[in-house]
Image (cartoon, helix red, strand yellow):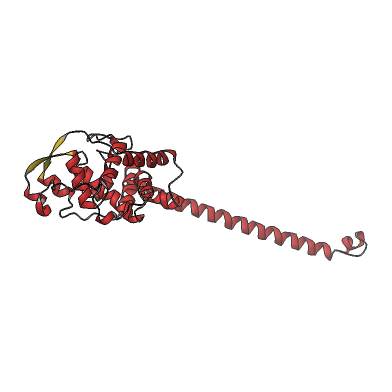
Amino acid sequence: MIVNGIQNMDATGAQAVTSVTGQGGDFSSYLQTTASLEQIFDEASKKYNVPKNLIKAIAKAESDFRPNATSKAGAQGIMQLMPATARELGVTDSYDPYQNIMGGTKYISQMLEKYNGDISLALAAYNAGSNNVAKYGGIPPFKETQNYVVKVTQYMNEGVSAPNASYTVNGSNAAAANNSGVQAASVEEAEEKYYESILEQLFSYEDYLKFIELYTKMLEVQQEKEEQQQQQQQEEQSDSYRAYQDLKYSPVAVNLLGGSV
């Protein structure tokens, strides 16, 4: 499924509402205000040119609109952002509904741009990562991802209603969500840093040095073993050749073999 005119359309075709952050988008000028989830989705849709129904469908599938949701893998908030990805998107508090929705919308907008508006591939990348989409040349053969794409697409087509709840939007949080002074890295860089952070949690730098030392010793032992085997083979071949020569020119051997060796 391809989004038509993603870059210049209102998400639902409905008349755009007034920005939560006010005219000009200067988030820092607002000390505090409140916004409903619908207003936040409207704001995110307008800012990143992503269909509002798509954003809401992702939020429904990811967390059922629960701001405090946390997955077993560590994904956080309404749009279930991984901590490393959230940081790269400029989100300082993943449990803040405004920041989380803005960050998740920016992320899916990057995926849509990457896959030329193909919603299915963008959703697959949102769920399983763009590396897996590239690896399998399309939606990965993971049951979870395939079901996810179907579920979100169905939610988007049928339409979902966000809970009638309002949340406080602080100027500092909104500024962070709007990347004021924060440059978000590319999706590939965000994913790379995420996996690096996982490795850092599993292995310390000291463990890495020990591994390199052990690996180097293993290579040295293997190389020494191969050299010994080659030398032994050469010695065996040399001994066999000398024995053959001795037999060839031995008068006794010549007589026993009828004069020919």
Q: Which residue occupies 75% across, 62% down? A: 241
Q: Specify whether residue 72 is in view.
A: yes
Please say if 178 is above or below 149.
below
Q: Specify whether residue 86 is in view.
A: no
| Picture coordinates of residue 218, whole percent (x, y) | 49, 50
Q: Quadrant of residue 53?
A: top left
Q: Which residue occupies 11% across, 46% down? A: 172
| Picture coordinates of residue 213, whole percent (x, y) | 41, 51
Q: Which residue occupies 75% across, 63% down? A: 242
- Among all residues in the image, which is located at the extreme front? 14
Q: Is residue 224 left or right of residue 97?
A: right
| Picture coordinates of residue 190, whole percent (x, y) | 30, 51
Q: Which residue occupies 85% across, 63% down? A: 250
Q: Is residue 127 left or right of residue 64?
A: right
| Picture coordinates of residue 167, whole percent (x, y) | 14, 37
Q: Which corner quadrant holds the C terminus?
A: bottom right
